Amino acid sequence: MTARTVVIAVALWLVLFTNGAFFKHVSEVYPLVGGNILFVFSLGIVLFSVTLIVLTLLSSRHTIKPALITLLLVTSATAYFMDAYDVVIDSHMIQNLLETNVKESTDLLSLKQLLYTIVLGVIPSFIVYRIKIIPMSLKETLIDKAKVILTALVVALVVIFAFSKYYTSFFREHKPLRYYANPAYYLYSIGHYVQETFSHPYSGLAPIGEDAKITGSDQPRKLIVLVVGEAVRWDHFGLNNYERDTTPLLRKEDIINFTQFTSCGTETAVSVPCMFSSFGREGYDKEKAKHTENVLDVLKRAGVNILWRDNNSNSKGVADRVTYEDYQTPKNNTICDEECRDEGMLVGLKEYIEAHPKGDILIVLHQMGNHGPAYYKRYSKAFEKYTPVCKTNQLEQCSKEEITNAYDNTILYTDTFLTKVIDFLKGNDEKFATGMFYLSDHGESLGENGLYLHGFPYNIAPEAQKHVPAVMWFGKQFNIDKAKIATFAKEPQTQDSLFHTLLGYLEVNTTIYQPELDLLHVGR
C-alpha cells in the first residue's frame, strides 16, 4: 500500500471508532432530526479531514509506522477515558497524567480499558506494522503530502461553507464540543503543554516576602494544622445542609464553616500550587509559580517550623524546600491495610513538636481523601454506613446511588480524621495557641450529565468540581473573634485567600501580606 492509503485508513478508523464522546455531545446539542442529521454527518467529514491533515504532517517516510502505531495506542486510551468518565484531555490533564504516580494509575486500570486498547489500538497497530508500504522518493513524498493536505483542506472548507449556518453557532457558541475531538484536541493540548513548559521567561527561584518577620512577642506559640483535602464537593459535606449527615463529629465541635468557598482549579496539579502561591487564580501560571517562592518559603524565612506530611501523590512542588514526609508508604505510615490511611499522618506529631521547643509550628497534612474513581478503597469497613457501594473503578457500571454511597462513606472517614486532628490540638492547648484549617483542593463530579471525577476545563467545569468545603477550628488560647469570622464565612471566598490567611494565622508581617485576603483579619 502507499503511505497515503495507510494514513487515510488510520484517519478513518480514528474518526469512526474513537470519537464516541465527540458525537455523543454533538448530538445532545444538535439532536438527530431534520437538517441536523446532515450537519452531524458533515462534522464527521470535517473531523476526518482535520485528522488526515494532522496524521499526514506527523508521518514521514521513515517514521510513518511508529507515528501511526503510537497515535493508535494513545488515542485508544484517550477514547476509553472520554467515553467512561466524560473527561477532556487539555493541557492541565496532560500535566495530571505526567504527575500521576503508579498507585493512582493502578486505580484507573480495568478490563474495559484493556479491551479498548486491544480492539482500538493493538489490533489496528498490528495491521499497520504488517503492511508493506510502497517506497517513494523524497520529492514524490512531499508532492503526495501536499496533494493530501490540500485536498483535505478544500473538502473541509467546502463542507463548512455549505453548512455555514450551523458552523457559525458551532464555533461561536459551542466551543466545548471541540474539546472531545480525538486525537486532534489532545495533540493540540500536548503542544500547548510543551510550549507552556519550555517556552517561558522564568528561571531560578524568585524570592518573595524577604522582609518577613513575626510581630510582637509571639506568645503563646502557635501550633497550626492545615489539612488539604482531596476531591470533596461542598454539597456532600454534612455541615452544608446535605440530606445525609456525613460530618456528625465535626457538628459537635466549635467549627466555623465557610459555605461559599471556591477552588483555584479543578485538579490537584493546579489547585495545590495555586493556593499556596501569591498569584491567585487569575494570575496563576504553572511555570511562574514553579520559579517563585510560595507562602511556606515566606513562613520558613520568618522562623516558623514547617512539616508537610503527604498521603496523596506529592506536594506538587509546594513543599520542595521544607521538611517533607511521604505517608503513602508503610515505612512511615503505621496505619495501613488495603492502603495507607490519612489518620496515620497523626502518629508521631507529638514527638515532632517536642523536637522543636522554639518558634511557631505549621503542620500540613495532605489527604488521600475522596480520590476517585475507587472511592470504596478510601475508607475501612467500619465507615461503610451507606450501602450498597460501588466496588469498581468503572463508575459507569454502577448506579448513581452506589457511587454516591461510596463517596459519602469516604467523607464520613474524613469527618473522623478531622476530629482526631482537633483532639490532637486540644491536647496541646495549654502550651500553644492552636488552630486547624481544612479545605478541599477541588470538588468532584459523580455522574451528573454523564460527567465523572474532576479536571474539566475551569471555565466550563460544573459547580460540583469548583465549590469546596472549608472549615476552621480554634483552641482556647487563640485570640480571635470567632463570631465575626463566622459571619464573614457566609460570604463568597476563594483559595486565593490561603496565602495571606497563613501569614495571618502565624502573625507574620511582610509587605506582600494583603489583609483583605486574610480570612482571619475581620476577627482580630
Image (cartoon, rainbow, N blue to C red):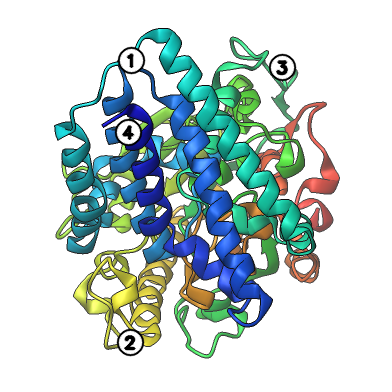
- Give percent across and percent down for residue 465: 57, 63
In this rendering, the answer to whether 167 lies above or below 259 is above
Q: Are discs 2 and 3 less than 8 Å apart at CB?
A: no
- Give percent across and percent down for residue 415: 43, 71
Name the residue beneath numbered marker 2.
Answer: 386
Going from N to C along the chain, the mark reached first, 2 or 1, is: 1
Please tell me which residue is depicted at 32% across the width and 49% down the height of the picture.
77
Quadrant assignment, res 1: top left
Name the residue beneath numbered marker 1.
Answer: 136
> SS of the residue at dot 4?
helix
The label on residue 68 is 4
In this rendering, the answer to whether 142 lies above or below 98 is above
Type of residue at label 2?
Tyr
- Give percent across and percent down for residue 392: 23, 70
Mark 4 or 2, which is nearer the eye? 4
Q: Does the image show residue 246?
A: yes
Please tell me which residue is depicted at 36% across the width and 61% down the height of the picture.
372
Going from N to C along the chain, the mark reached first, 3 or 4, is: 4
Going from N to C along the chain, the mark reached first, 3 or 1, is: 1
**Separation (CA) of disc 3 from disc 1:** 64 Å
Q: Are discs 1 and 4 less than 8 Å apart at CB?
A: no
Q: Are discs 3 and 4 less than 8 Å apart at CB?
A: no
Going from N to C along the chain, the mark reached first, 2 or 3, is: 3
Type of residue at label 1?
Met
**Separation (CA) of disc 4 from disc 2:** 47 Å
Type of residue at label 4?
Leu
Name the residue beneath numbered marker 3.
Answer: 210
